Image: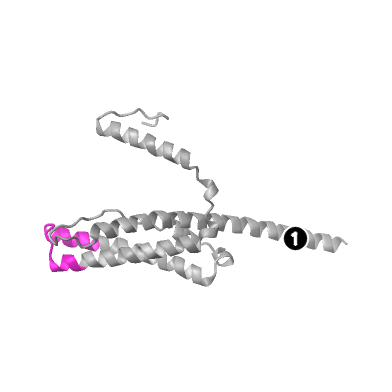
Amino acid sequence: MTVVAIFIAFWLAGWGERKTLDTATEQKLHLVALEAVYNSGKAKEIFVDYAKLSDPNKFLINIKRLDSVAATEAFQDENVLALLSSNKVSLLKSYMDRISDLNRVQQIHQGILESKGYNPSKTENNFRQDVCNTAANAYAEAIVLQEELDKYFDRTLYYHEETKRIEERIKTIQEKALNGEWLPSQRGFL
């Protein structure tokens, strides 16, 4: 009887530890899905800004860079294979690579523009097309990653009314700042 009790105690301790690890990994995957939401929006904006316009002498550049911190953190989690299939882990790595690729081609394109005095050229046009293609790839991977991690995304954590209130408050303070009205720090840090 004592042996059985000890076995059950060890089993329960192991189960509790596994549950804690799984919960931590699930939270990381939730953040990856959220990151993918933001990155898909940014990738779409970048694509639109770099897409060939009717006037080839006119172009927009986008200085936004995508981030894959949450994906990197989840990818490095030793427990991720306990929750995700190897295909989904591979998708996670591919997503991180696309984010890196997009940031790199944007930086190269911007360097070319700077070296050419912001005048369009065949080289610039080729790199602009590379940015478009890479933005479309990053967008697609972010969308698919969101779909594949949907079960880890907890929608109950988001309060849309509160988010809207905060966004409005930020907008109001931004407008005041643009008019030279500065608010004092609430915590006395400055």
- Quadrant hosting residue 46: bottom left
- Residue 189 in magenta? no
Looking at the image, the residue that sits furthest to the bottom is: 87
Q: Position of residue 41 (x, y in %)?
A: 36, 55
Residue farthest toward the right in the current orientation of the protein: 1
Quadrant of res 7: bottom right
Give the quadrant of the N terminus.
bottom right
Q: Is residue 29 visible?
A: yes
Depth check, front residue: 173 or 16: 173
Residue 159 shown left or right of residue 182 in the figure = right
Q: Is residue 27 above or below residue 102?
A: above
- Residue tagged by mark 1? 10
Q: Is residue 162 left or right of residue 176?
A: right
Residue depicted at 50% across the width and 45% down the height = 158
Q: Looking at the picture, tell me which residue is in the foreground, 158 or 20.
A: 158
Q: Is residue 114 magenta?
A: yes
The local crowd at label 1, few if under 14, some if 14 to 19, many if 20 or more residues have their Cα within 10 Å, is few
| In-image side of 116 versus 161 (left or right) | left
- Provide the secondary structure element on which disc 1 rests: helix
User: Residue visible at 14% across and 62% down?
Assistant: 56
Q: Residue at x 40, y 65 (%)?
A: 141
**In what quadrant of the picture does the C terminus appear?**
top left
Q: Where residue 148 sits: x, y (%)?
A: 49, 64
In the image, is 98 to the left or to the right of 1?
left
Q: What's the amino acid at mark 1?
A: Phe
Return the residue nearer the eye: 24 or 58. 58
Residue 76 seen in this snapshot: no
Q: Quadrant of residue 43?
A: bottom left
Q: What range is drawn magenta here?
A: 107-126
The chief SS type of the magenta part is helix
Residue in the image at 34% along x and 33% along y? 172
